[in-house]
């Protein structure tokens, strides 16, 4: 008899604990599959210490394969759920699709950064939800202090040494506390100009820091922060963010190069497309963590609205404590539904909270007893060591070394600014060059149930992983043949984007017609050829993919290739948007359906020669002279200007190589589709 199949989506606090509990109870009598974008569980409470250089990154990551026996790990992100067909569609890290069938499903997809409609925040701020963001912040803060120490301009020095953290909750308070200690240690080695010291601001619209915790914890944290020099501004918010600073709600403009966004989280957008009742974006479940109407589906963690039986009419808050305990109950109840044990309702009383304020300082109230100072620091670190499912000795060793040795003040430059956009449905993954733009994942189309909450911008398209099914239209991708060039990674660096060397912008835009080795595309009001703009004689770069694979083609060809922006005037179809959109979004350009000479077929259509297999494309009113056929040794070769006095016109562009034509020699220098790296 086949074993029952259990699929767990997400390996955060709830998903990891569900998999561990279920594995211990079933002991191989169920086929457990864990779907997660990374191969590790991230212990989020210690992430501020990674950003401050106290802990090395791998200390807060716990191997899934090494700590979850009898659990099969599948790397990927769920992008479609068929509740009626009992299957989950996902996309793996290399972009390939797959499908997992299940008898029981546990949704523990967690949360993402919470965004507010504040101008400029999405472009110039960075969140703090994943390991890549912590590594970026560590490098960025180190770089700003080093640049400030070498600057002769007092205004620039002060701006680089000003750090703004928005959100005085659990995460924001710890980031500001650890950050102040980190920058103070940096300037002891690299003194700044006289009278300038690192400045940290902690902003929140709430009347006090840690508004969701006990007031005594709030007073302790506020006192420690102010004693270190952190400017705590309650009742204050950000009205606008720019590349050079932020404007506050009280009208003050703060010059800064660093804006850390810690205003809270929102449930993962995946649950919005299930067509099931929601509570403020969270999937409603019963006290047994089951989805009403689908007893085979369980939900827990930040994405689930779990009734709080201790406070009737309320739901458990989105905290790591509750997610961890959700996972234990979910694992037991899934096992009970398979015949192993009995199910139970979720009931939990807070045992207290701990807030690490850096050094030996902390605020804690274990069992309701308020503590502060070194005693609270010892309790806080002891709690974290007990709660971590692995790496305890390594974490304790790093704490000891940090106490006796100076911190390593170096920047590795492994994570760039555009790699960790604020608007990301996957903060645990850094964006790679040539990958999808920083855009929130659209709500998936759930097959078999009415998508009542599906967004208007999600269009059903054929799902490559499920024949005949439909899935969400994924974010438009950048040109796969032209990876983004990492450049200046300052948040909102407009100069780098304008020069075409800054890689993808913070809003996901890719500078069209710019960058090393990439010719500018003619504008809509500029002629492709003519007396003032002669046709380019640059040959198409040859390679195994042939022309039309993302490489720039010689201007004068009126057919865009696959992955290449269309020359203005061509009435080409653009995936997801009009070509004249101006929204700044990066879009994927699709080649025309090709015949023997169509775009993307390996040979561009010769201008002036109609293609009998395809009607004339509309929208182009410019007449482009056809390239002359080479008929002898005295004809000009492609790319070579005609000798003075010759009455023969220069060819508009050489014929691209194809099966029946010789391939032109590749010009010397870097290939157009592989531009050199920009300055890092």
Image (cartoon, rainbow, N blue to C red):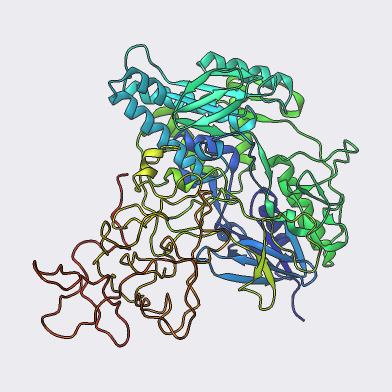
Outermost top residue:
195
Residue 500 x %, y %: 35, 48
Given residues 118 and 341, the one toward you in this image is: 118
Q: How many marks?
A: 0
* Residue at horizontal 78 percent and vertical 60 percent from the top: 451
Residue 173 x %, y %: 59, 27
Residue 565 higher or lower than 491, as above or below? below
* Residue at horizontal 82 percent and vertical 58 percent from the top: 333
Residue 664 x %, y %: 23, 76
Given residues 44 and 440, the one toward you in this image is: 440
Position of 565 with respect to 67 (left or right) is left
Residue 644 quadrant:
bottom left
Outermost bottom residue:
660
Instruction: Say if residue 71 shows up in the picture.
Output: no
Position of 188 with respect to 237 (left or right) is left
* Residue at horizontal 39 percent and vertical 20 percent from the top: 158
Residue 19 quadrant:
bottom right
Given residues 468 and 341, the one toward you in this image is: 468
Residue 5 x %, y %: 73, 71
Position of 220 with respect to 612 (left or right) is right
Which quarter shows the C terminus?
A: top left
Which quarter shows the N terminus?
A: bottom right
Instruction: Say if residue 339 shows up in the picture.
Output: yes
Given residues 330 and 541, the one toward you in this image is: 541
Position of 250 with respect to 80 (left or right) is left
Residue 233 quadrant:
top right
Outermost left residue:
644
């Amino acid at each position: 008899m086949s074993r029952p199949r259990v699929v767990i989506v997400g390996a955060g606090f709830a998903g990891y604990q569900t998999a561990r509990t279920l594995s211990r109870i079933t002991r191989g009598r169920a086929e457990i599959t864990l779907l997660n974008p990374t191969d590790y569980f991230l212990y989020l409470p210690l992430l501020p210490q990674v950003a401050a250089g106290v802990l090395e990154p791998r200390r807060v990551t716990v191997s899934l394969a090494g700590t979850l026996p009898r659990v099969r790990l599948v790397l990927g992100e769920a992008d479609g759920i068929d509740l009626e067909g009992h299957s989950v569609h996902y996309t793996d890290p290399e972009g390939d699709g797959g499908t997992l069938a299940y008898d029981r499903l546990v949704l523990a997809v967690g949360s993402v950064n919470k965004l507010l409609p504040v101008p400029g925040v999405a472009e110039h701020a960075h969140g703090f939800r994943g390991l890549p963001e912590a590594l970026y912040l560590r490098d960025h803060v180190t770089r700003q202090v080093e640049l400030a120490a070498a600057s002769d301009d007092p205004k620039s020095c002060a701006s680089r040494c000003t750090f703004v953290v928005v959100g005085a909750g659990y995460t924001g308070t710890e980031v500001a506390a650890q950050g102040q200690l980190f920058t103070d240690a940096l300037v002891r080695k690299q003194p700044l100009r006289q009278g300038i010291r690192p400045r940290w601001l902690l902003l929140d619209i709430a009347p006090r820091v840690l508004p969701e915790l006990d007031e005594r914890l709030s007073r302790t944290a506020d006192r420690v922060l102010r004693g270190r020099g952190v400017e705590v501004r309650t009742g204050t918010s950000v009205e606008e963010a720019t590349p050079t600073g932020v404007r506050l709600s009280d009208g003050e403009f703060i010059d800064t190069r660093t804006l850390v966004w810690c205003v809270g989280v929102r449930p993962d957008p995946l649950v919005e497309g299930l067509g099931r009742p929601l509570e403020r974006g969270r999937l409603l479940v019963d006290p047994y963590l089951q989805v009403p109407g689908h007893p085979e589906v369980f939900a827990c963690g930040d994405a689930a609205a779990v009734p709080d039986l201790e406070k009737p009419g309320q739901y458990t808050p989105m905290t790591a404590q509750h997610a961890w305990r959700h996972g234990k109950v979910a694992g037991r109840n899934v096992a009970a539904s398979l015949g192993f044990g009995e199910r139970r309702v979720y009931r939990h009383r807070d045992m207290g909270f701990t807030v690490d304020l850096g050094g030996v300082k902390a605020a804690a109230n274990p069992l309701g007893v308020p503590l502060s100072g070194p005693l609270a620091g010892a309790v806080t670190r002891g709690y974290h060591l007990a709660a971590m499912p692995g790496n305890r000795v390594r974490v304790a060793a790093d704490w000891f070394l940090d106490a006796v040795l100076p911190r390593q003040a170096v920047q590795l430059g492994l994570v760039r600014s555009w790699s960790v956009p604020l608007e990301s449905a996957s903060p645990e993954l850094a964006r790679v060059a040539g990958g999808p733009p920083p855009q929130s994942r659209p709500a998936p189309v759930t097959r078999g149930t009415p998508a009542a909450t599906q967004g208007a911008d999600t269009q059903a398209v054929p799902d490559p992983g499920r024949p005949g099914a439909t899935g969400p239209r994924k974010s438009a991708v950048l040109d796969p043949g032209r990876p983004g060039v990492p450049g200046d990674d300052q948040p909102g660096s407009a100069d780098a984007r304008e020069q075409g060397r800054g890689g993808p912008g913070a809003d996901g835009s890719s500078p069209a017609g710019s960058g090393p080795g990439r010719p500018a595309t003619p504008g809509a009001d500029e002629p492709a050829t003519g007396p003032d703009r002669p046709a380019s004689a640059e040959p198409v770069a040859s390679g195994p993919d042939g022309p039309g694979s993302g490489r720039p083609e010689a201007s004068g060809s009126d057919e865009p290739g696959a992955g290449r922006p269309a020359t203005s005037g061509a009435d080409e179809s653009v995936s997801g948007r009009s070509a004249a959109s101006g929204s700044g979004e990066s879009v994927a350009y699709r080649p025309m359906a090709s015949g023997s000479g169509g775009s993307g077929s390996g040979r561009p259509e010769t201008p002036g020669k109609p293609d009998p297999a395809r009607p004339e494309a509309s929208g182009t009113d410019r007449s482009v002279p056809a390239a002359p056929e080479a008929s002898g040794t005295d004809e000009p070769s492609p790319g070579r200007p005609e000798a003075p006095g010759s009455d023969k016109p220069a060819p508009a562009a050489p014929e691209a190589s194809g099966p029946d034509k010789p391939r032109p020699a590749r010009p010397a220098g870097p290939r157009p589709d592989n531009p050199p790296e920009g300055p890092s």
